[in-house]
Amino acid sequence: MKFEDVHARTAQLEQEAMTMGLLRTPVQPQGFSECFYFGREGRYQCMVMELLSRSLEDCVQICKGKFNPLSTALVGEQLICRLEYLHSKGIVHRDIKPENFMCGAGPKVHHLYMIDFGLSKRYYDKNHVVMRDKLSLTGTARYASINAHKGLEQSRRDDLEAVGHMLLYFLRGVLPWSGLDATTKEEKYRKIRQKKEDTPLSELCEKFPKEFKDYLEYARNLDFQERPNYKWCRALFAEVREKEGPCEDHGFEWLAGQKIDVDSLVPLNPWTTPRQPDEPDQAAKGSGGRRGWCICGGKMPRND
């Protein structure tokens, strides 16, 4: 491995350790692996983390390349909670992909964990970061937001859009911009961006519950500094879950047929909405608040 690659990987590990330390303050949350140790051992930087199980990409392969809408909705619900918590710490992930979400082990086999914060970045530190352009693409091109392809600074909206692309990958098994021929990385990225922009959401989401289209359309229409309505996003997937199910939190199709002692499972905690860094104090909210764009042509609940 080249010195430059070693240096970059070390920087990523340091970023990951710092982020994981921030995430466990004041308590270790569900869905984020506990870091027991990070430091240098001889020539090497070492990180000791909580043992997890398989990744969502592994789960897709177990399910023969795709998930049914119910499992995808269950995934979506948990992933929005993970993003909401991460964003509440002023951090965006910037590398959303199936390999960066893991199942827990043992009695937490139905818990989905967000991992790999090597490319994460602060978007809020006393103030929201300013918009920048002409940036190189950070993240995985298959799932990256259109604005990330355009070289724009990433914010919360980009994580949400990338999750939307990933959920469609789970449903479809393949995305229209996968496997495009290109002779250079730059050409490949350009073709992927063009295909994302040219593919109508009605075509991308055809034959699947409309809530998946609603979600992706909402994410793509968020402004750079806009605080997402995470509650509304979770409600979309809860609606799919109710229509396709109902089912328990451990009702993932890849767990079907396994001998699981349901009584021994650690339940998912009831979701407590974390305060976002740009969210006004309770006493200062009053009757104001910004109403967001709504796919139904009306007004969504205020983000307050």
Image: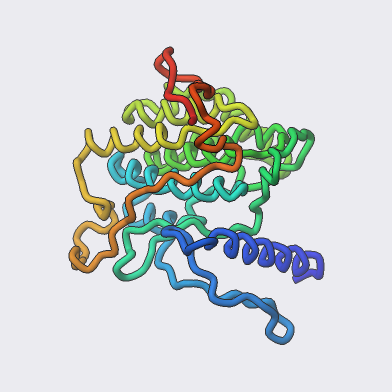
Q: Residue 124 is drawn in which quadrant?
A: top right
Q: Residue 158 is drawn in which quadrant?
A: top right
Q: How is the image coloured?
A: rainbow
Residue 71: x %, y % from top left: 30, 46
Image check: 154 left or right of 216? right
Q: Residue furthest bottom?
A: 42
Residue under the image location 47 percent in, 50 percent down? 82
Q: Residue furthest top?
A: 297
Residue under the image location 63 percent in, 66 percent down? 17
Residue 282: x %, y % from top left: 50, 36
Front-most of residues 19 and 303: 303
Residue 285: x %, y % from top left: 52, 29
Q: Residue furthest right?
A: 3
Front-most of residues 48 and 254: 48
In the rendered view, tell whether residue 302 sits above or below residue 59: above
Residue under the image location 75 percent in, 35 percent down? 130
Residue 259 appears in the picture as rendered:
no
Residue under the image location 39 percent in, 31 percent down? 212
Q: Residue furthest front?
A: 283
Image check: 196 left or right of 236? right
